[in-house]
Amino acid sequence: MEAKHVILSALEMHRNLTPLFVKDLADDTLTAQPANMKNHAAWQMGHIAFALAGGCWFAGGERDLPEGWGELFGAGSTPQSDRSIYPSKQALVAQLDKQGEALEQAVSKADASALAAENPREAMRRIAPTVAEALVYLTSGHYGYHLGQLAAWRNAMGLPKAFPR
């Protein structure tokens, strides 16, 4: 199985799961931090979108995010409980969709040599030496990790499971 197929399959799976985790969330609760959970739903959603935009850049596409998203959702950002500093649920969902589509298009257009190239983020090279490996990580491990955190947040909020077993 070629890397492009693995990347696109992982991305599709997680993009199909994401609405199950967010569809019933009330906008005004997105920055709640139950049980001292630092990474609230608004941050999880924005961070996933931020990471997908980074993946688009890895794949040779454009990183196209609203102004200020790096500070709110990038690596090293600190989730805040103040709901007014975060985008609406509608805007967060729209960015998840937009960035997922952009990454899908960028990966689909990338040729084998671009995917085999050295990971441009030196700090990630130890775990993902190539662009393809970075994209596999972003679309599977990283995306799944943050959906798992969102599942734990939902549980702490007393919300039902995102999907039945």
Image: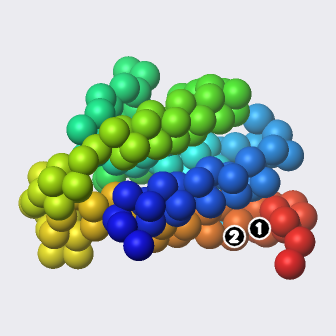
Across and down, in percent, residue 88 comes to 66, 27
Left-right relation of 101 to 125: right
Question: Does the rendering let one see residue 48?
Answer: yes
Where is the N terminus found, in terms of image quarters?
A: bottom left
Q: Tell me which colouring the rendered structure shows.
A: rainbow
What percent of the width, then of the height, locates residue 149? 60, 66
The residue furthest bottom is 165
Q: Residues within 10 Å of mark 1 (few under 14, many from 20)?
A: some
The location of residue 98, given as percent across then percent down, is 53, 31
Q: Residue furthest top?
A: 67
Q: CA gap, disc 1 to disc 2?
A: 6 Å
Residue with the mark numbered 1: 156
CB contact under 8 Å: marks 1 and 2: yes
Q: In the image, which disc is placed on residue 152?
A: 2
The answer to whether residue 75 is above or below residue 97 is below
> Of the residues tagged 1 and 2, which is closer to the observer?
2
Amino acid type for the residue under numbered disc 1: Ala
Q: Which mark is residue 96?
A: none
Which residue lies at the image location 78% right of the left edge and 54% below the top edge?
A: 20
Q: In which quarter of the image is residue 5?
A: bottom left
- Identified at 70% across, 43% down, the residue is 30
Give the secondary structure at mark 1. Answer: helix
80 or 144, nearer to the observer: 144
Q: Position of residue 38 (x, y in %)?
A: 54, 60
Amino acid type at circle 2 is Ala
- Left or right: residue 71 versus residue 102 is left
**Image: 127 above or below 73:** below
